Amino acid sequence: MSVGNRLHRLAVRGCLIAAVILPSSLHAQTLDTTEGQQPPIEEAKPDGQTATPEHQNQSGDTPEDAKERDPVDWPISREPDKPVDTSAGDKEPEERNRYPDCPYEKVEECDLLAQQSMAKSTNYMDKAAWIGVLLSAIAVGLIWKTMKYTAAAADYAKDAVKAARDAVDEAERATRVAKDSLSETRNTAERQLRPYIVTHEPHIDDLRPGQIPNVKVTFKNTGQTPAVNAKGSVWMTLGYFPPVSDFDFPITKDAAYSTFVLAPNGTITVGGRLKYALKKDQFEAICAGKMAVYAYGTVTYDDAFQKGRETGFRLFCTSADNVAAGGVFSLSNDGNYIK
Protein backbone atom coordinates (compact mmCIF):
# COMPACT_ATOMS: atom_id res chain seq x y z
CA MET A 1 0.00 0.00 0.00
CA SER A 2 1.33 3.45 -0.87
CA VAL A 3 2.12 6.15 1.73
CA GLY A 4 -0.66 8.36 0.37
CA ASN A 5 -3.32 5.67 0.91
CA ARG A 6 -2.07 5.04 4.46
CA LEU A 7 -2.24 8.74 5.35
CA HIS A 8 -5.74 8.99 3.88
CA ARG A 9 -6.97 6.03 5.95
CA LEU A 10 -5.34 7.47 9.08
CA ALA A 11 -7.12 10.82 8.56
CA VAL A 12 -10.51 9.13 8.08
CA ARG A 13 -10.04 6.98 11.18
CA GLY A 14 -9.03 10.01 13.28
CA CYS A 15 -12.17 11.89 12.25
CA LEU A 16 -14.38 8.87 13.06
CA ILE A 17 -12.75 8.38 16.48
CA ALA A 18 -13.21 12.07 17.31
CA ALA A 19 -16.87 11.94 16.24
CA VAL A 20 -17.56 8.88 18.46
CA ILE A 21 -15.51 9.66 21.59
CA LEU A 22 -16.12 13.40 22.08
CA PRO A 23 -19.97 13.26 22.52
CA SER A 24 -19.65 10.39 25.03
CA SER A 25 -17.01 12.20 27.09
CA LEU A 26 -19.07 15.41 27.13
CA HIS A 27 -22.16 13.54 28.39
CA ALA A 28 -20.15 11.83 31.15
CA GLN A 29 -18.62 15.14 32.24
CA THR A 30 -22.08 16.75 32.43
CA LEU A 31 -23.40 13.96 34.67
CA ASP A 32 -20.39 14.17 36.99
CA THR A 33 -20.86 17.92 37.33
CA THR A 34 -24.53 17.53 38.27
CA GLU A 35 -23.93 14.85 40.88
CA GLY A 36 -21.03 16.66 42.56
CA GLN A 37 -22.78 20.05 42.88
CA GLN A 38 -23.21 21.21 46.44
CA PRO A 39 -26.24 23.26 47.60
CA PRO A 40 -25.67 26.95 48.34
CA ILE A 41 -24.95 27.74 51.99
CA GLU A 42 -27.93 29.38 53.69
CA GLU A 43 -27.12 32.43 55.80
CA ALA A 44 -27.81 31.94 59.55
CA LYS A 45 -30.79 33.77 61.05
CA PRO A 46 -31.38 34.85 64.69
CA ASP A 47 -33.47 32.62 66.85
CA GLY A 48 -37.15 33.25 66.76
CA GLN A 49 -36.96 34.88 63.28
CA THR A 50 -37.80 33.21 60.02
CA ALA A 51 -36.40 34.09 56.62
CA THR A 52 -39.68 35.43 55.38
CA PRO A 53 -42.05 36.30 58.30
CA GLU A 54 -45.52 37.09 57.22
CA HIS A 55 -45.94 39.83 59.87
CA GLN A 56 -42.82 41.73 58.74
CA ASN A 57 -43.13 44.36 56.09
CA GLN A 58 -40.59 45.35 53.44
CA SER A 59 -38.79 47.88 55.76
CA GLY A 60 -38.35 45.34 58.58
CA ASP A 61 -40.67 47.09 61.13
CA THR A 62 -43.45 45.51 63.16
CA PRO A 63 -47.03 46.72 62.85
CA GLU A 64 -46.77 48.51 66.20
CA ASP A 65 -43.70 50.45 65.04
CA ALA A 66 -45.43 51.27 61.81
CA LYS A 67 -48.38 52.81 63.68
CA GLU A 68 -46.11 55.12 65.67
CA ARG A 69 -44.55 56.46 62.47
CA ASP A 70 -46.19 58.99 60.32
CA PRO A 71 -47.99 57.44 57.33
CA VAL A 72 -45.92 59.68 55.13
CA ASP A 73 -42.79 57.77 56.19
CA TRP A 74 -44.24 54.43 55.07
CA PRO A 75 -42.62 52.76 52.09
CA ILE A 76 -44.36 53.60 48.85
CA SER A 77 -44.71 49.93 47.93
CA ARG A 78 -46.60 49.14 51.13
CA GLU A 79 -50.30 48.45 50.67
CA PRO A 80 -51.61 47.59 54.16
CA ASP A 81 -55.20 47.19 53.12
CA LYS A 82 -54.37 44.64 50.35
CA PRO A 83 -54.64 41.01 51.44
CA VAL A 84 -51.45 38.98 51.20
CA ASP A 85 -51.46 36.26 48.57
CA THR A 86 -50.82 33.02 50.37
CA SER A 87 -51.05 30.85 47.30
CA ALA A 88 -47.32 31.34 46.41
CA GLY A 89 -46.35 28.46 48.60
CA ASP A 90 -48.72 26.23 46.71
CA LYS A 91 -47.04 27.07 43.37
CA GLU A 92 -43.56 26.06 44.54
CA PRO A 93 -44.20 22.30 44.23
CA GLU A 94 -45.50 22.86 40.70
CA GLU A 95 -42.37 24.79 39.69
CA ARG A 96 -40.28 22.18 41.48
CA ASN A 97 -41.64 19.57 39.09
CA ARG A 98 -39.54 21.12 36.32
CA TYR A 99 -36.42 19.54 37.92
CA PRO A 100 -37.40 15.97 38.80
CA ASP A 101 -33.70 14.88 39.02
CA CYS A 102 -32.50 17.88 41.07
CA PRO A 103 -31.10 16.85 44.52
CA TYR A 104 -32.20 20.15 46.15
CA GLU A 105 -35.51 21.18 47.61
CA LYS A 106 -35.76 24.76 46.43
CA VAL A 107 -36.41 25.88 42.89
CA GLU A 108 -33.83 28.68 43.12
CA GLU A 109 -31.13 26.17 43.97
CA CYS A 110 -32.12 23.94 41.05
CA ASP A 111 -32.07 26.97 38.71
CA LEU A 112 -28.61 27.89 39.93
CA LEU A 113 -27.41 24.31 39.49
CA ALA A 114 -28.82 24.18 35.96
CA GLN A 115 -27.11 27.45 35.05
CA GLN A 116 -23.78 26.24 36.42
CA SER A 117 -24.15 22.95 34.53
CA MET A 118 -24.95 24.79 31.31
CA ALA A 119 -21.93 27.07 31.78
CA LYS A 120 -19.60 24.13 32.26
CA SER A 121 -21.18 22.29 29.32
CA THR A 122 -20.65 25.37 27.19
CA ASN A 123 -17.01 25.46 28.29
CA TYR A 124 -16.54 21.79 27.44
CA MET A 125 -18.29 22.25 24.11
CA ASP A 126 -15.95 25.15 23.35
CA LYS A 127 -12.95 22.95 24.14
CA ALA A 128 -14.44 20.12 22.10
CA ALA A 129 -14.96 22.51 19.18
CA TRP A 130 -11.30 23.56 19.33
CA ILE A 131 -10.27 19.90 19.49
CA GLY A 132 -12.50 19.24 16.45
CA VAL A 133 -10.89 22.16 14.64
CA LEU A 134 -7.45 20.76 15.49
CA LEU A 135 -8.41 17.29 14.31
CA SER A 136 -9.94 18.77 11.17
CA ALA A 137 -6.72 20.67 10.48
CA ILE A 138 -4.74 17.47 10.98
CA ALA A 139 -7.14 15.63 8.69
CA VAL A 140 -6.83 18.36 6.05
CA GLY A 141 -3.06 18.17 6.34
CA LEU A 142 -3.13 14.39 5.95
CA ILE A 143 -5.52 14.66 3.00
CA TRP A 144 -3.23 17.25 1.39
CA LYS A 145 -0.32 14.93 1.99
CA THR A 146 -2.35 12.10 0.46
CA MET A 147 -3.14 14.21 -2.61
CA LYS A 148 0.54 15.12 -2.89
CA TYR A 149 1.61 11.49 -2.79
CA THR A 150 -1.23 10.56 -5.15
CA ALA A 151 -0.07 13.20 -7.64
CA ALA A 152 3.50 11.92 -7.28
CA ALA A 153 2.26 8.38 -7.86
CA ALA A 154 0.36 9.54 -10.95
CA ASP A 155 3.48 11.26 -12.29
CA TYR A 156 5.50 8.13 -11.56
CA ALA A 157 2.90 6.00 -13.34
CA LYS A 158 2.96 8.40 -16.30
CA ASP A 159 6.75 8.19 -16.44
CA ALA A 160 6.54 4.41 -16.17
CA VAL A 161 4.06 4.27 -19.07
CA LYS A 162 6.32 6.54 -21.14
CA ALA A 163 9.32 4.37 -20.29
CA ALA A 164 7.32 1.27 -21.23
CA ARG A 165 6.33 2.83 -24.56
CA ASP A 166 9.93 3.79 -25.20
CA ALA A 167 10.95 0.24 -24.37
CA VAL A 168 8.32 -1.12 -26.77
CA ASP A 169 9.49 1.25 -29.50
CA GLU A 170 13.08 0.25 -28.87
CA ALA A 171 12.08 -3.42 -28.98
CA GLU A 172 10.27 -2.83 -32.27
CA ARG A 173 13.31 -1.06 -33.69
CA ALA A 174 15.51 -3.90 -32.48
CA THR A 175 13.11 -6.37 -34.07
CA ARG A 176 13.22 -4.50 -37.37
CA VAL A 177 16.99 -4.36 -37.22
CA ALA A 178 17.10 -8.08 -36.46
CA LYS A 179 14.74 -8.81 -39.35
CA ASP A 180 16.79 -6.65 -41.68
CA SER A 181 19.97 -8.31 -40.45
CA LEU A 182 18.41 -11.75 -40.90
CA SER A 183 17.20 -10.81 -44.37
CA GLU A 184 20.63 -9.45 -45.25
CA THR A 185 22.25 -12.60 -43.88
CA ARG A 186 19.89 -14.74 -45.93
CA ASN A 187 20.55 -12.65 -49.03
CA THR A 188 24.28 -12.84 -48.40
CA ALA A 189 24.06 -16.61 -48.01
CA GLU A 190 22.03 -16.87 -51.21
CA ARG A 191 24.49 -14.68 -53.07
CA GLN A 192 27.35 -16.83 -51.86
CA LEU A 193 25.67 -20.17 -52.53
CA ARG A 194 23.52 -19.52 -55.58
CA PRO A 195 24.57 -20.67 -59.09
CA TYR A 196 26.10 -18.13 -61.47
CA ILE A 197 26.04 -19.02 -65.18
CA VAL A 198 28.39 -17.04 -67.42
CA THR A 199 29.62 -17.39 -71.01
CA HIS A 200 32.93 -19.21 -71.42
CA GLU A 201 35.25 -19.25 -74.50
CA PRO A 202 32.74 -18.45 -77.31
CA HIS A 203 33.98 -18.71 -80.94
CA ILE A 204 32.75 -18.76 -84.59
CA ASP A 205 33.22 -21.50 -87.16
CA ASP A 206 33.07 -21.09 -90.96
CA LEU A 207 33.56 -17.31 -90.88
CA ARG A 208 34.43 -16.82 -94.62
CA PRO A 209 32.62 -15.80 -97.80
CA GLY A 210 30.08 -18.26 -99.17
CA GLN A 211 29.74 -20.11 -95.85
CA ILE A 212 27.08 -19.94 -93.14
CA PRO A 213 28.87 -18.96 -89.95
CA ASN A 214 27.85 -20.76 -86.74
CA VAL A 215 28.62 -19.80 -83.16
CA LYS A 216 29.53 -21.95 -80.20
CA VAL A 217 28.78 -20.47 -76.77
CA THR A 218 29.89 -22.37 -73.68
CA PHE A 219 28.03 -21.73 -70.42
CA LYS A 220 29.75 -22.35 -67.09
CA ASN A 221 28.29 -22.47 -63.55
CA THR A 222 30.70 -20.57 -61.30
CA GLY A 223 28.45 -20.78 -58.21
CA GLN A 224 28.43 -23.25 -55.30
CA THR A 225 25.03 -24.88 -55.95
CA PRO A 226 23.61 -26.45 -59.14
CA ALA A 227 21.37 -24.67 -61.62
CA VAL A 228 18.29 -26.71 -62.48
CA ASN A 229 15.78 -26.37 -65.28
CA ALA A 230 18.35 -24.34 -67.20
CA LYS A 231 17.43 -23.26 -70.74
CA GLY A 232 19.89 -21.46 -73.00
CA SER A 233 19.02 -19.58 -76.24
CA VAL A 234 21.50 -18.16 -78.80
CA TRP A 235 20.87 -15.82 -81.76
CA MET A 236 23.24 -14.48 -84.48
CA THR A 237 23.07 -11.44 -86.75
CA LEU A 238 25.25 -9.05 -88.78
CA GLY A 239 25.32 -5.33 -88.09
CA TYR A 240 27.36 -2.16 -88.24
CA PHE A 241 30.18 -1.62 -85.83
CA PRO A 242 29.91 0.14 -83.60
CA PRO A 243 26.16 -0.48 -83.56
CA VAL A 244 23.87 2.43 -84.13
CA SER A 245 21.61 3.47 -81.28
CA ASP A 246 18.44 2.10 -82.87
CA PHE A 247 20.00 -1.19 -83.94
CA ASP A 248 17.57 -4.06 -83.33
CA PHE A 249 18.74 -7.41 -82.00
CA PRO A 250 15.89 -9.62 -83.17
CA ILE A 251 14.50 -12.37 -80.91
CA THR A 252 13.03 -15.18 -82.99
CA LYS A 253 11.39 -18.45 -82.12
CA ASP A 254 13.85 -20.51 -84.16
CA ALA A 255 16.77 -19.75 -81.85
CA ALA A 256 19.03 -22.61 -80.83
CA TYR A 257 18.37 -23.59 -77.23
CA SER A 258 18.95 -26.48 -74.82
CA THR A 259 17.50 -27.52 -71.47
CA PHE A 260 19.96 -28.85 -68.91
CA VAL A 261 21.14 -29.07 -65.30
CA LEU A 262 24.45 -27.42 -64.62
CA ALA A 263 26.44 -28.46 -61.57
CA PRO A 264 28.98 -26.19 -59.86
CA ASN A 265 31.96 -25.60 -62.21
CA GLY A 266 30.05 -27.54 -64.87
CA THR A 267 29.93 -26.38 -68.52
CA ILE A 268 27.70 -26.88 -71.50
CA THR A 269 27.98 -25.58 -75.08
CA VAL A 270 25.05 -24.23 -77.05
CA GLY A 271 25.33 -23.38 -80.75
CA GLY A 272 23.60 -21.07 -83.19
CA ARG A 273 24.04 -19.98 -86.83
CA LEU A 274 23.11 -17.31 -89.37
CA LYS A 275 20.17 -17.85 -91.69
CA TYR A 276 22.20 -17.07 -94.81
CA ALA A 277 25.69 -17.44 -96.25
CA LEU A 278 28.21 -14.69 -95.69
CA LYS A 279 28.83 -12.48 -98.71
CA LYS A 280 32.27 -11.24 -99.79
CA ASP A 281 31.59 -7.55 -99.19
CA GLN A 282 30.19 -8.40 -95.79
CA PHE A 283 33.30 -10.43 -94.97
CA GLU A 284 35.55 -7.55 -96.09
CA ALA A 285 33.54 -5.07 -93.95
CA ILE A 286 33.98 -7.38 -90.95
CA CYS A 287 37.73 -7.59 -91.50
CA ALA A 288 37.88 -3.79 -91.88
CA GLY A 289 36.06 -3.29 -88.57
CA LYS A 290 33.04 -1.63 -90.17
CA MET A 291 30.70 -4.56 -89.49
CA ALA A 292 30.58 -7.29 -86.85
CA VAL A 293 29.06 -10.67 -86.22
CA TYR A 294 26.87 -10.45 -83.12
CA ALA A 295 25.93 -13.43 -80.92
CA TYR A 296 23.43 -12.80 -78.12
CA GLY A 297 20.96 -14.68 -75.97
CA THR A 298 19.79 -15.62 -72.48
CA VAL A 299 20.02 -18.48 -69.98
CA THR A 300 17.18 -18.98 -67.50
CA TYR A 301 17.43 -21.39 -64.54
CA ASP A 302 16.31 -22.10 -60.96
CA ASP A 303 18.64 -22.05 -57.98
CA ALA A 304 18.66 -24.19 -54.80
CA PHE A 305 16.39 -21.64 -53.09
CA GLN A 306 13.69 -22.16 -55.73
CA LYS A 307 14.15 -18.71 -57.18
CA GLY A 308 14.25 -18.03 -60.89
CA ARG A 309 17.52 -16.61 -62.24
CA GLU A 310 18.62 -15.27 -65.61
CA THR A 311 21.86 -14.48 -67.42
CA GLY A 312 21.95 -12.32 -70.54
CA PHE A 313 24.92 -11.96 -72.91
CA ARG A 314 25.93 -10.06 -76.09
CA LEU A 315 29.14 -10.81 -78.00
CA PHE A 316 30.68 -9.41 -81.17
CA CYS A 317 33.47 -10.40 -83.57
CA THR A 318 35.17 -7.86 -85.86
CA SER A 319 38.63 -6.90 -87.27
CA ALA A 320 40.97 -9.00 -89.33
CA ASP A 321 42.96 -10.16 -86.31
CA ASN A 322 39.95 -11.70 -84.61
CA VAL A 323 38.82 -13.30 -87.86
CA ALA A 324 42.29 -14.69 -88.48
CA ALA A 325 42.38 -16.05 -84.92
CA GLY A 326 39.36 -18.23 -85.69
CA GLY A 327 36.56 -15.82 -84.88
CA VAL A 328 37.31 -14.58 -81.37
CA PHE A 329 34.42 -12.91 -79.60
CA SER A 330 34.48 -9.95 -77.24
CA LEU A 331 31.89 -8.77 -74.73
CA SER A 332 29.70 -5.87 -75.74
CA ASN A 333 29.26 -2.86 -73.52
CA ASP A 334 25.51 -3.48 -73.39
CA GLY A 335 23.26 -6.49 -73.04
CA ASN A 336 25.30 -8.43 -70.43
CA TYR A 337 23.71 -9.05 -67.02
CA ILE A 338 23.08 -11.64 -64.30
CA LYS A 339 19.84 -11.61 -62.33
Image: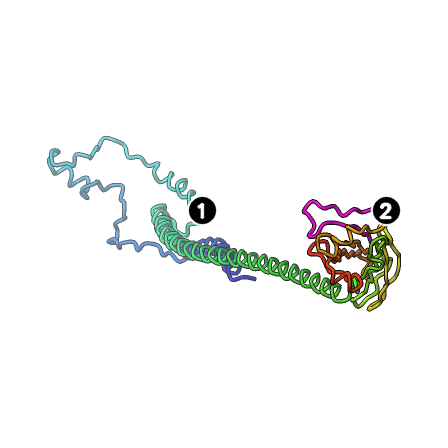
Give the residues in magenta: 234-254
Q: Is residue 169 above or below residue 64?
A: below
Q: Quadrant of residue 301?
A: bottom right
Image coords of residue 158 (percent x, y): 53, 56
Mark 1 packing: few (<14 Cα in 10 Å), some, or many (20+)? few
Secondary structure, mark 2, is loop
Left or right: residue 89 versus residue 182 is left
Q: Name the amino acid type tagged 1.
A: Pro
- Residue located beneath label 1 in the image: 100
Q: Name the amino acid type tagged 2.
A: Lys
Left or right: residue 108 versus residue 194 is left
Tag nearer the camera, 1 or 2: 2
Tell me the quadrant of the picture where the C terminus can be found.
Answer: bottom right
Q: Is residue 28 magenta?
A: no
Please report the residue visible at 34 percent of the width from the left and 38 percent of the height from the top. 88
Image coords of residue 58 (percent x, y): 21, 40
- Residue located beneath label 2 in the image: 253
Image coords of residue 290 (percent x, y): 70, 52
**Residue contact at pointers 1 and 2, CB within 8 angstroms:** no
Tell me the quadrant of the picture where the N terminus can be found.
Answer: bottom right
Mark 2 packing: few (<14 Cα in 10 Å), some, or many (20+)? few
Q: Residue 272: in sight, yes or no?
A: yes
Q: Residue 339: in sight, yes or no?
A: no
**Front residue (pair 96, 151):** 151
Q: Majority secondary structure of the magenta segment? A: loop
